[in-house]
Amino acid sequence: MRILLSNDDGVHADGLASLYQELAAQHDVTVIAPDRNCSGASNALSLQQPLRIQKMNNGFYAVNGTPSDCVHLGINSFMQDDPQLVVSGINHGANLGDDVIYSGTVAAATEGRYMGLPAIAVSLCNYQGGHFATAARIVGDIIRHLGAHPLAADQILNINVPDLPYDQLKGIQVTRQGRRHRAESMLKSQDPWGREIYWYGKVGQEQDAGPGTDFHAIAKGYCSVTPLSVDMTAYQSLEEMQSWIEKL
């Protein structure tokens, strides 16, 4: 299978290298990733600057853009043959619940789906990294079953994996997104010249983290697999909204 592999932690990230090692043993894998850490980039595109792509010594390609740029460039212009699957990760840290809105990892997969391809995002639930091989093996296992169980045309898979050895995982659970509380306040500080600066604080604590959620699966030692829709329409509100819009 031809796979386009990207991430948001940058082309030098350990998680990317680990996932490439796993997938390249069985598939034709092209790596196109940002030349720097782009965590939190979401679906941003670089519309105010040209994109440049550079081949690294290890055969990976680095782009001076966002995760979405990398996938769009790879599919639309750079790769001679379209990939059959887009994979993004392994992210250094979880992408659970509301995290997916901001995640460059999930955005890279979403861009692949927007381009008409099945796509997977995968994250290891530890910012420091650790058992990337576990997450890589899970992705390999899932890809082997996609032929017989293809993804829906409007969905991607968001995979989160506990930072555990593979043989210590409790299993895999199909989950829904949980939700977090409001994020903590921003941190106010000063730069060396005494000017005010602000840093984002910690993410909010879990609010909806009960059974069936991605948060709950990870807390119990399971790998979480959440199908995400790229169509954000709130279909349940269409009829009610139509009834009052018509009265305007």
Image (cartoon, grey):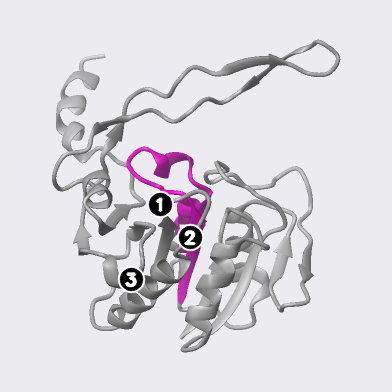
Asked whether the viewer can see residue 173, the reply is yes
Query: What residue is drawn where x is 58% and y is 53%?
Result: 8
Query: What residue is drawn where x is 45% and y is 50%?
Result: 126
Residue depth check, mark 1 versus mark 3: number of the one nearer the observer: 3
Magenta region, residue range: 85-112
Q: Earlier in the sequence, mark 2 or mark 3?
A: 2
- Magenta-colored stretch includes residue 31: no
* Residue 164 at x, y percent in the picture: 36, 62
Kind of residue at disc 1: Cys
Kind of residue at disc 3: Tyr
Can you tell which mark lies on residue 130? 2
Q: CA distance from mark 1 to mark 3?
A: 14 Å
Q: CA distance from mark 1 to mark 2?
A: 9 Å
- Magenta-colored stretch includes residue 87: yes
Q: Is residue 238 above or below residue 13?
A: above
- Which residue is labeled 1 in the image? 125
Q: Tell me the quadrant of the picture where the C terminus can be found.
A: top left
Callout 1 crowding tier (Cα within 10 Å): few <14, some 14–19, many ≥20? many
Can you tell which mark lies on residue 3? none
User: Taking 107 as reference, is 153 left or right?
Assistant: left
